[in-house]
Structure formats: structure tokens, C-alpha cells
Image: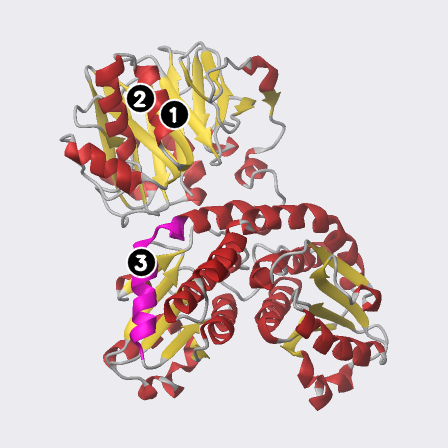
Amino acid sequence: MCGIIGVIALPGKTPYSPGVMVYRGLLRLEYRGYDSAGVASIVGEHVRVLKGKGRIIDLERRIGLSSIEGLTVIGHTRWATHGTPSDRNAHPHIDCSGRIAVIHNGIIQNFRELKKILVEKGHVFRSDTDTEVFPHLVEELYRDTNNLFEAFRKAVEMIDGSYALIMISSIEPDKIFFAKKDSPLIIGLGIGFNILASDIPAILEYTRRIITVRDGWLGYVTPTSIHIEDIRGGVVDWRRYIRVVEWSLEDATRGGYAHFMLKEIHEQPRALKDTYYGILHDVAVGEAVKLMHDADKIYVTAAGTSFHASYYFSLLMSILGKRLVIPFIASEYESYYLTASDKDLLVVVSQSGETMDALKALRAFRNRGAGVVAVSNVVDSAIPRESNIAVYTRAGPEIGVAATKTFTTQTLVLSWLAIAYAEASGSLSKSEADMLRGWLGRSGEVVGKIIARLEPVAKRLAEWFRSVGNAYYLSRSIGVPVAMEGALKLKEIAYIHAEAYPAGESKHGPIALVEEGFPVIFTIPNREDLEKLLLGNIQEMKARGAVIIGVASENTGLSDQLDYHFRIPDTHWILTPITHTPPQQLLAYYTAVSKGYDPDKPRNLAKTVTVE
């Protein structure tokens, strides 16, 4: 996820210069990405670019982003997906002639194929990014068409993936070109100026009149006009789509959501989709699977939410790959690393890539000669840098302290690795593996439906849940890590004691605490064998007066046993951590809010733990 903005203006029609407007807009978009940034403007027959690695405010001191001159200016703040954070990988990217500059939010899936063609035609690339193919494509197509908008359109038609694209060119300096598919883009309407941006915060200082660009639209803006077409070439009557934003600037930073946590829960469909397409052709997956296949022993480690994803991975490897994977909490690495050798492999999972416990575990295993595979959300962070192979989620920045979208995207990546391993080892046939990957590919769409359907249910249940003092989160097999994650969410933001454990352990002590009205949340995977096992556990809780809350398929045979039922669409059990987690996130969120707590800032916690 990245932030993009473009301003085009007539002289004297804006409160600040376009360069300053873009800079101020980038500061308000920095929550979307902050590993590098840059700006570009048109100067004579060429474009001028200022960019570099680092936070926007540091780049302002170093290279003066806001000082860029011109009446047509674009800017970008990056969250790396292709190519490490660096000066050369920062946006904007230009063509060989230096007359075209492009910024992009999204993923161009077929960039390797396009880059190969362009290199054969003599184009010289300066970065490792997927985005850079686009200005070169436009340059190449312009030679054939001598029409810049037609070249832009043809280039858009040639790329696969998700994108919000903004392009400027000295060939037509009075226009900013744009196109959108999946990634967000809005137009802000001014008097004597127009603005394009990823999100409303970037423009709210200058205008409240906006157009939300729809998928498949492309066009251009000038200081005084707008032209929009659909992908078939039909002209769009954009005036029908103008609306006035009523949010405050603070509200707008959160996209209208009350808290970042809620916003990030709602971002999961997009994050899952981006992560799926990101790993679809990622060569690092194959390299990681080879290391797993060649290893004598495989360990997986993480902390907090990431450990729950790691635990799920270890269970999935056992079920699908018939391979033992040893999970351990990173802070306990000293009990494990002495058993490792140069024939073994450690998988390290960390949202930030900077978690100190996980980093120390990695270094201890490396000192024993073990190989390391990292799964992280931050490109070129410490853990990926010190690993042999890094596989990335594409969740985008996560600001809320309580992890949400990073958990579901981690489990998607780890599921993909387990499926790939099982296929490579012969435990799964290609058709079986393709079927499971197909379910992962649909996960974003399914989660979107789940959130829309179950948010009101969670909100109502939270009004009762706010009064409880304790809760159990129970499941079996692949559902246990999901129960652990649900309990963690309730503890960390609603400050309610919640304990998660395998449901079969109830009779070995914990059931002694259950009394009338005690809430027990069951994560029920969509597997008949697990439903049969869980039936007995549910009944033994009900017999002692427990209130049973089930997160289960809408077609479960256990619905008559549940006092409350979060009805999950009927999907394959491989999606359990992805489908069964969002309702539990929403329940924890609304419980915290109903108790008057700020879920974005839970007491005693920080987003990234960089101390032991």
C-alpha cells in the first residue's frame, strides 16, 4: 500500500505552490507507506524528480521535496512490494527520454514479461520495481501512436494486477493522466486547480468536493477540466459522481472510521487480495520450499499474534505435508537453538521484521549454521535482511497496535508455503494443491462478505460482553491458533481475562471455573470430524450454564447448540484462520469501545517490540 498525489493548477489559484501542496498531502498519506518518497514536476521539455529512501520529513530536510517548482506536480510515499527500500526504487519513475514520470499504488503482476520485452527493445531500467515498466511502455507506445493519451490507454490495457496510476509528461504538460483498478484513487475539484490522491486526507485542506474514481476508469485532469473514460472507451459523465466530504481532517485520516483498528479490519479483503497476487508468481516461494524440503528439521518462531499464525503453519504442515514442524515462542529460543544444526531450517514470522525476540532467535539459529526463511510485512527490514529467503505479505502499514490484517495475510502466506511444500513432496497432487490455492485466491472476497454480514452481530453481542470478567476461547486442531488469537484480542484491547486452549483440555481443570453465564467462544472449523469432537465439549460447557458463542459455517450441524452463532459462509477448512478471525476481531473491538477504551492505544503495549 502506497500513497500518491498529484496537483495541477493555474498560476495564483492555490493557497500554496503545487510543490508545497503535494508535500503537505504526502505527510497526510504517510500512514500508507513510509520507507521512501519522491516528487516530480515538469521543467521545460523534461521532468524533474526528487526522491529518496527515508521518511518524508527527513527527505524534506535533505533534498527539499516541497521546493520543487512547477504547476504540475506529483508525489508518492512508498510501502515496498517489489525492490528494497532505496533511493533508486523510490517513486516517481521515468522513461528513457526523461519526459514521462509515473507514480503507482498496487502491483503489476506481469511486469517481468513486459520488462523483458522492453529491455529487448533497448529500454534501460534504473530500479527493481514493477512500476518502472509503465513509463517505458508509454514511451514505446507513443512512438507508434504519436498520441499520449492513446499510448497511456494502451499501456494500461497491457498490465495485469492492481493499480492507481498517475502520470505526467512534458509532451503534454497541462495534464495529469490517471487510471484505476482495485487500488483507491479520488479526484479533488478546485477552482483553477484539480488534485488526484489515494485518500481524502491529502486533499481536505484544499477542497471538500471529490469524485471517487471507479475501477476501470482512466482519463486526465487539467487545472480547469476533467476527462474520464471507462475501459471500453465510453465517456463518463463525471459530474454525476461529485460528492461533498463532511469529515473532519482527523476523521479523514482514518477514512471515516472511528479507529485505525476498525479501518484495518475492513482493509482485510484488499490486503488478502494484494498478498495473494503478490505471492502468486514470487520466486522466493519456490526457494523457500526447497530449503524446507532439504532441511532435516524445521522450526518456526514468532511472538504474539505472529506466533498464532506460526502455530497454524506447523499444524498445516503436519496435516498437508506429513512433516513435523517445531513451533516455539521467540523469547524462548534459548530452549531450542542448541538442537539446531547446519542441516536445519528456521522460519521466522514478524509483521514489522524488527521484533527483537524473533531477531535474537534468528541470530542464535544462524550461529548454529541453520538456514532461515523470513515472513514479514516490511520489505528489507532487519529479519528479512538477515535471512536466506524472505517472503512478504502485502498488508500495508498497520497502525493499530492490535494486529488484524497482518494476521490474516500471514496465515495466507504460510498456508501457501505449506501447500507448495505438500505438493513438492508428493503429499498433495497438483489438482488438490490447485484447489486449495483457489480457495486462498477467493479469501479476500469471502472476508468482505463476512465483515459486512457479521459486524452488526458483533456490535450487538458486545453490549452484553462488556459486562463479563472472564471468557474461554476453545477449539481443536487448526482452530486452536484462531482461538488463541481471538482471546489475545479481547485481552489486549478490552482488558477482559480470556484464556484459549484445546477444547479437549476442559475436563483437565479449566472447566472448574465455568458457571452460569460464563462465555465460551468456540472456533469451529468446517470439518465434520472436528465438529463431532467439539459437540461433546460444547455440551459439557452448556451443562454447567455457559453461554456458547460459535464461529462456524452457516451450514454447521452444531447450530442448535449455540446461543450465538457467527455464521461463516460455507468454505474449505483451509481458510479457517482467515474466515473465523474477523468476527472475533470485531467482537473484541466493539467490546472495547462499549467499555469506553481506545482500541488503537491499549495500555502498556506498543506496536513493534524492539526490546527483549
Instruction: Answer whether labels 1 and 2 touch (C-beta < 8 Å).
Output: yes
Q: Position of residue 405 (x, y in %)?
A: 52, 54
Looking at this view, name the residue that lies furthest to the bottom.
508
Whether the magenta-drawn stretch holds residue 312 is answered as no
Identified at 66% across, 64% down, the residue is: 526
Label 2 crowd bin: few (<14), some (14–19), many (20+), radius 10 Å: many
Reading the chain from its start, which is encountered first: label 1 or label 2?
A: 1
Per the image, the residue denoted by label 2 is 168
Q: Name the mark nearer the viewer: 1 or 3.
A: 3
Magenta part of the chain: 278-295
The amino acid at mark 2 is Ile
Asked if labels 3 and 1 touch by Cβ distance under 8 angstroms, the answer is: no
Measure the alpha-carbon separation of dots 2 and 3: 34 Å
Dot 1 amino acid type = Gly
3D distance between C-alphas at marks 1 and 3: 34 Å
Please tell me which residue is depicted at 29% across the width and 31% down the height of the picture: 134
Dot 3 falls on a residue whose secondary structure is helix
Mark 2 or 3, nearer chain start: 2
Instruction: Tell me, yes or no, whether the two marked residues, 2 and 3, touch with CB atoms within 8 Å.
Output: no
Q: Amino acid at mark 3?
A: Ala
* Figure quadrant of the N terminus: top left
Residue 394 locus on image (x, y percent): 43, 50
Q: Which quadrant of the rendered structure holds the C terminus? A: bottom left
Residue at mark 1: 6
Question: Which of the labelled discs sits on residue 284, or is there none?
Answer: 3
Which disc is residue 192 wearing? none
